[in-house]
Image (cartoon, helix red, strand yellow):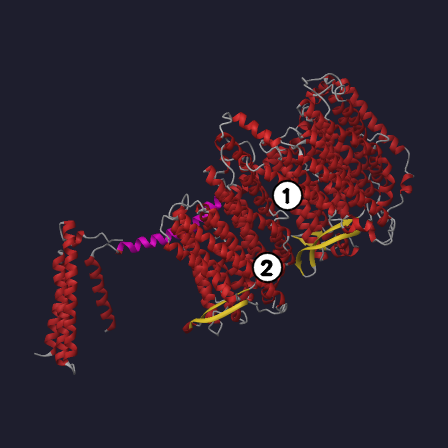
């Protein structure tokens, strides 16, 4: 199977699954779930195949250590709207491949985790698959317009998914989430159109645009527009408030996918479009954004400290951890950029598992209030141990993925000798203490202590539920213990971006 | 009779129609006023076709076209009006404001 | 043979890890789901009563002791391997120091985290005198504690989990001491933290244990954050994580520069070493971060014995020793180390006098002894390269390491003995004990040896190492520290024998049922008397081989004879005082004195209210002062601003809505007017 075909297939399959679900009678839940599961299993297989192929190809490709042009493998382009020079232009580099791998794992686990959805299951799975198709589309696109289109495809189903299948103040949360993200999209669109017209070559092709040297005055205003636009999805302070409400209200699979993958689109866009295309703008604005994301990191951690709802705790920790992604980027050093990318993967796995477990626990206890729980270790050892482990991943314990990413971020950020970077690094490092406090607080309240009598007859995870949890745990440990191959891959992809930044 | 007579007549018809549409409270009355406006326009077409056009048939097509369409429109509109009457037992447009924002 | 041992040195870490994995897998298979089991039993109508169910589940959980035996088997192999490694090291490296710079052998090194070209964190095994010493201590104590635990934990439903976690701890601790670079050390540093966390909270249904585990983790984590900053600072300057590079004089020279923080000029070397030491500060529970260690005694006693006295808490001392060439250059840091060490030594000893909980007394005693080790390091000064210069005094370094060695054994034994006592009377309270001499003779005599050792009485192990420490302080001219050390020695003897007399002598102060000495437990306790008695023989090794360029120990042996005499006299007088107050298990006289001291005693007994100060800081300042306002700010200001945007838009919508009144004729009127206006404008 040749590469470009594989890439196209990967984003088309979820659409096909959505169509297939459309044809299934609305009460045949089993068949729809089966379609979704099989479709995404095939996709997982394809993405793994893609990864292997990529490692194969990237291994023999010239290292390009001094080049500032990203090498997109499996590239293919064909005109789409000739009049505006929009092309169906696809290709991947290591970051996209890893993000696709993350997506495939998370959605597969997410579908397993939402096996119990009964209400309007048909629409649920259709929307979920459309969303996934959008996410894959973003990662394979090189053409900015197509990228933007897929981005919108990924964001909009979220409204219905949260508004219909959510819990709590779901309509409010859904509305807030979508409005804020769409406002971010407006910024992105403005930025992209700016790039298109300002480049002088009227193209949306990322690879071509990266070789254009935009004027400083243009970069000066375009960079913050794009960075903030994508940053909204990456929950940059103060535009993070959609995240706690959105995550808390969303159903399990949607939380998993949204916190695990969709938020990463923000970081991906900031890096790929913002910093890569507008390096001079990045240089000018980095101090400002550094301060913002440092606030993010600390603020999310302190915010999580006093929450009582398990999902809110996780959501604020996501704000803090996604802040670390951008924090790595704003360090503007090779190791920092790499750390940011690693943190995207690590946080994706971690937070997906977090929400997955919370969903399963909530399904049993019917409460998410921390103070009402306790002693679950006694009745659900598997879920509890998994929860403890993912908590440790969250606070950056070595041997789990979080540490690998955070170590890179901190080392990278410290390598930038500017005084403000140093101060912010110290502050960000201190945030790991606060992280430890809220994580342990949640863990202790949940799994330790005497068990309430009303919970004493609850049961542990079923065999089916153990599958996604085990997969994600395996990935967390895998990345934490053997990070070598991921780092090698990311190195190759970061190099041109870094070269572009420091030219 | 010159072109200006016809234009003035059609203008008057149109103005009467607009006046009717704006002031009548009865839906049927409004519909009739709309017909008056359309007829004003038709007269205008016919007059210009007669006095100015190289090929008078081109102008004559439009009034016929308008009449056909307005007949259809009337059929639909009357159907709506009748069902509205059945529902509300009155056709006072001041009372028909469900579509306000 | 030696070749084989060196090339396969990773086995040292693999064995305990294997033990952990095997037990966990076995556990997962066996212990699928207690609630599931419960339900199955219920369905079969075998039992209706929930107590019965619980009993069934517990019986099921107890099962055979395979996990413990497996752990012991692997721990034995590991101990043998550790000994083999030590022998090979002794025979090959120490015999030919000229082939091995700094007597160091890195016998395994694998790239793990590649940060940027040239900056890679490895996973390695680094053998030098102190790591080899620690390997022997850890593997030996781990084996003995595992054996002991078979007896101690035999009635616990979570027997298997205990051994799994103990193996995990052994793995992490061994990884820590053999680290070849500082990042690897940090990795294992965190892992021991987690093992400690899970083991303190081992009885997770007990709220106090859960709280203690959280406290321990967070306090050490707080220190670790500074440690991490220190690592970043040092590695950024040195462009390396490796200890071999960091300990080079070039690194010290590179760091020895002044920077301005805010407006205060700071020496970078002092700053970096202080930050690194901060990690050890937390892990070794020095004042004021000592608060977690006494609480950590909520864990099972074997855990307290191995983790919270013998091995993990000396990690801070080990870290300082590991980077000592760098620390040696930083005069300010060494002064801090010395001050904090000596202060904690006497501070903890004073608190220990007033405590009633047997394990807490031992915990404070551990703090005090750790203080000894640190101030001993603080008075030392060595250089692993170059010639001996004037003022270089390696004795403190060797003495600290020697004390780590002796302390590990006698303190481990004290804890194991305390565990045996607790097992006998089912209480931690010293006042509930008494008269156990008759019932537990083996424990009695072994603990006597340990108490004499910690009291510094000739010829027990503690005498030699404490003597060396005091001598180091004296020779380097730190007379105040020396005095503190001497007084603390007396206090130590006093509170240890207070414990000893109250526990063993006199009459039983509570009802005792079926007190006996468990063979597994007694075996370990008795086995530990061997190093407690015989560790004095290693003095030569510690003095001569610890550092490459130290003074020959013979030079130190020329120390004034009055020193050991005085130290022994102080120790003996402490014992005498304890006998005077508490001999025959009496407490009346002590009560009188307590009355006399009144509020001062209260203050000390409540540990100077430091826990309360922390509670105030964490709850009032961090939780309510920062956490709550941030939450409020987020909900009201940030979120409020976003909602305000929404509101403004809605308001705009409302305005526009007014125009949309549903009146057909109004719309048309507006249209006509608009048309008229357009025509008017166009004309």
Is A431 colored magenta in this rendering? no
The reply, left or right, for residue A202 in relation to residue C312 is left
Q: Is residue C194 above or below residue A3?
A: above
Q: Mark 1 falls within which chain?
A: C
Residue named by callout 2: A337
Callout 1: few (<14), some (14-19), or many (20+) C-alpha neighbours within 10 Å? many
Q: Secondary structure under badge 2?
A: helix
Question: How far across and down, in percent of the image, does residue C352 sit?
Answer: 72, 29
Question: How far across and down, in percent of the image, does residue C141 sit?
Answer: 75, 37
Residue at horizontal 89 percent and vertical 42 percent from the top: C553
Residue at horizontal 67 percent and vertical 18 percent from the top: C513
Q: Which residues are magenta?
A: C632-658
The reply, left or right, for residue C570 in relation to residue C631 is right
Residue named by callout 1: C222
Report the front residue among C198 and A112: A112
Q: Secondary structure of the magenta portion, mostly?
A: helix
């Amino acid at each position: 199977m040749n590469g470009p075909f594989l890439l196209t297939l990967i984003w088309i399959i979820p659409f096909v699954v959505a169509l297939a679900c459309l044809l299934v009678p609305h009460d045949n839940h089993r068949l729809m779930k089966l379609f979704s599961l099989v479709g995404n299993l095939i996709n997982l297989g394809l993405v793994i195949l893609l990864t292997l192929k990529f490692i194969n190809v990237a291994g023999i490709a010239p290292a390009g250590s001094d080049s500032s042009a990203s090498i997109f493998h499996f590239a293919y382009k064909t005109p789409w709207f000739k009049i505006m020079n929009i092309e169906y232009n696809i290709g991947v580099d290591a970051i996209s491949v890893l993000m696709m791998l993350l997506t495939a794992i998370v959605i597969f686990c997410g579908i397993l985790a939402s096996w119990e959805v009964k209400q309007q299951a048909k629409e649920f799975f259709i929307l979920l698959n459309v969303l996934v198709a959008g996410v894959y589309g973003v990662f394979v696109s090189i053409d900015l317009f197509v990228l933007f289109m897929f981005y919108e495809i990924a964001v909009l189903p979220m409204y219905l998914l949260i508004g219909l299948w959510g819990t709590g103040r779901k309509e409010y949360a859904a509305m807030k989430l979508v409005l804020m993200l769409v406002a971010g999209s407006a910024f992105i669109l403005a930025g992209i159109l700016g790039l298109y017209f300002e480049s002088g070559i009227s193209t949306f092709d990322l690879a071509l645009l990266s070789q254009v040297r935009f004027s400083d005055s243009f970069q000066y205003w375009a960079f913050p527009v794009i960075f903030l636009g994508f940053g909204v999805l990456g929950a940059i302070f103060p535009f993070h408030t959609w995240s706690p409400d959105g995550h808390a209200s969303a159903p399990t699979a949607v939380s998993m996918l949204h916190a695990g993958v969709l938020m990463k689109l923000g970081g991906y866009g900031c890096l790929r479009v913002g910093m890569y295309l507008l390096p001079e703008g990045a240089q000018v604005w980095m101090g400002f954004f550094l301060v913002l994301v440092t606030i993010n990191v600390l603020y999310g951690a302190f915010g999580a400290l006093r929450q009582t709802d398990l999902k809110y705790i996780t959501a604020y920790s996501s704000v803090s951890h996604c802040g670390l992604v951008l924090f790595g980027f704003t360090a503007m050093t090779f190791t920092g950029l790499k750390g940011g990318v690693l943190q995207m993967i690590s946080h994706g796995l971690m937070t997906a598992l977090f929400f997955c477990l919370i969903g399963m626990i909530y399904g049993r206890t019917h409460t998410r209030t921390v103070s009402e729980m306790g002693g679950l270790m006694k009745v659900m050892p598997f879920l509890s141990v998994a929860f403890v482990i993912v908590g440790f991943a969250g606070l950056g314990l070595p041997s789990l993925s979080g540490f690998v990413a955070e170590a890179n971020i901190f080392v990278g950020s410290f390598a930038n000798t500017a005084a403000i970077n140093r101060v912010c690094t110290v502050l960000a490092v201190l945030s790991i203490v606060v992280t430890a406090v809220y994580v342990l607080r949640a863990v202790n309240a949940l799994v330790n202590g005497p068990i309430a009598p009303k919970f004493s007859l609850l049961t542990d995870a079923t065999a089916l539920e153990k599958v996604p949890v085990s997969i994600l745990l395996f990935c967390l440990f895998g990345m934490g213990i053997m990070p070598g191959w991921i780092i090698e891959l990311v190195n190759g992809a970061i190099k041109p971006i870094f070269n572009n930044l420091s030219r | 009779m010159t072109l200006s007579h016809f234009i003035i007549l059609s203008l008057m018809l149109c103005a009467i129609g607009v006046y009717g549409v704006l002031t009548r409270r009865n839906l049927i009355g409004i519909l009739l006023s709309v017909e008056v406006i359309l007829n004003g326009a038709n007269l205008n077409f016919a007059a210009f076709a007669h006095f100015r056009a190289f090929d008078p048939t081109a102008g004559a097509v439009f009034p016929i076209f308008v009449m056909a369409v307005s007949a259809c429109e009337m059929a639909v509109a009357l159907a709506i009006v009748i069902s509205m009457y059945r529902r509300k037992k009155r056709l006072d447009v001041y009372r028909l404001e469900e579509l306000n924002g | 043979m030696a070749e084989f041992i060196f090339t396969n040195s990773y086995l040292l870490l693999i064995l305990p890890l294997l033990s952990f994995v095997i037990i966990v897998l076995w556990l997962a298979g066996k212990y699928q789901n207690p609630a599931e089991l419960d339900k199955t039993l219920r369905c079969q109508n075998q039992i209706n009563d929930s107590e019965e169910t619980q009993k069934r589940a517990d019986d099921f959980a107890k099962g055979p002791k395979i996990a413990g035996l497996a752990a012991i088997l692997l721990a034995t192999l590991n101990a043998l391997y550790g000994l083999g490694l030590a022998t090979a090291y002794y025979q090959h490296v120490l015999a030919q120091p000229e082939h091995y710079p700094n007597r160091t052998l890195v016998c395994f090194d694998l790239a793990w985290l590649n940060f940027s070209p040239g900056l890679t964190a490895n996973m390695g095994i680094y053998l030098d005198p102190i790591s080899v010493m620690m390997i022997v201590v850890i593997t030996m104590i781990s084996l003995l504690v595992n054996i002991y635990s078979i007896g101690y934990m035999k009635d616990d439903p979570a027997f298997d989990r205990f051994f799994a976690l103990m193996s995990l701890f052994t793995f992490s601790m061994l990884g820590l001491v053999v680290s070849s670079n500082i990042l690897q050390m940090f990795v294992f540093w965190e892992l021991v933290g987690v093992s400690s966390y899970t083991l303190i909270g081992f009885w997770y249904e007990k709220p106090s244990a859960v709280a203690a585990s959280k406290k321990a983790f967070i306090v050490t984590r707080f220190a670790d954050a500074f440690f991490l900053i220190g690592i970043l600072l040092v590695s950024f300057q040195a462009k390396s994580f490796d200890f071999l590079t960091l300990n080079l004089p070039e690194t010290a020279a590179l760091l020895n520069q002044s920077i301005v923080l805010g407006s205060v000029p700071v020496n970078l070397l002092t700053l970096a070493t202080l930050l690194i030491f901060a990690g050890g500060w937390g892990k070794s529970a020095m004042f004021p971060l000592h608060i977690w260690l006494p609480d950590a005694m909520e864990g099972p006693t074997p855990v307290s014995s191995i983790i919270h006295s013998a091995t993990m808490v000396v990690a801070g001392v080990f870290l300082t020793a590991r980077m000592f060439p760098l620390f040696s250059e930083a005069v300010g840091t060494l002064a801090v180390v010395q001050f904090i060490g000596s202060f904690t030594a006497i501070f903890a000893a004073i608190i220990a006098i007033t405590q009633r909980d047997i394990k807490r007394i031992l915990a404070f005693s551990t703090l005090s002894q750790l203080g000894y080790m640190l101030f001993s390091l603080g008075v030392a000064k060595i250089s692993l390269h170059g010639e001996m210069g004037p003022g270089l005094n390696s004795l403190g370094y060797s003495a600290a390491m020697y004390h780590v060695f002796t302390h590990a054994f006698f303190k481990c034994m004290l804890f194991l003995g305390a565990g045996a006592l607790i097992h006998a009377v089912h209480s931690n309270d010293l006042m509930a004990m008494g008269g156990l001499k008759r019932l537990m003779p083996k424990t009695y005599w072994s603990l006597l040896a340990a108490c004499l050792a910690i009291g510094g009485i000739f010829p027990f192990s503690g005498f030699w190492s404490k003597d060396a420490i005091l001598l180091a302080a004296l020779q380097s001219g730190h007379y105040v520290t020396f005095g503190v050390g001497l007084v603390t020695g007396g206090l130590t003897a006093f509170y240890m024998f207070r414990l000893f007399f109250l526990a063993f002598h006199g009459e039983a102060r509570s009802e005792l049922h079926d007190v006996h000495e468990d063979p597994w437990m007694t075996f370990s306790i008795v086995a530990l008397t061997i190093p407690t008695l015989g560790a004095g023989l290693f003095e030569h090794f510690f003095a001569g081989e610890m550092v490459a360029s130290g003074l020959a120990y013979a030079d130190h042996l020329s120390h004034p004879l009055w020193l050991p005499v005085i130290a022994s006299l102080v120790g003996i007088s402490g014992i005498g005082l304890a006998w005077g107050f508490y001999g025959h298990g009496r407490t009346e006289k002590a009560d009188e004195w307590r009355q006399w001291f009144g509020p001062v005693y209260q203050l000390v007994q409540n540990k100077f209210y430091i826990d309360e100060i922390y509670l105030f800081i964490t709850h009032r300042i961090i939780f309510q002062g920062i956490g709550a306002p941030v939450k409020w700010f987020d909900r009201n200001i940030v979120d409020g601003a976003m909602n305000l945007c929404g509101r403004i838009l809605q308001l705009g919508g409302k305005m526009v809505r007014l125009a949309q009144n549903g009146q057909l004729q109004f719309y048309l009127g507006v249209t006509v007017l608009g048309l008229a206006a357009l025509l008017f404008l166009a004309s």
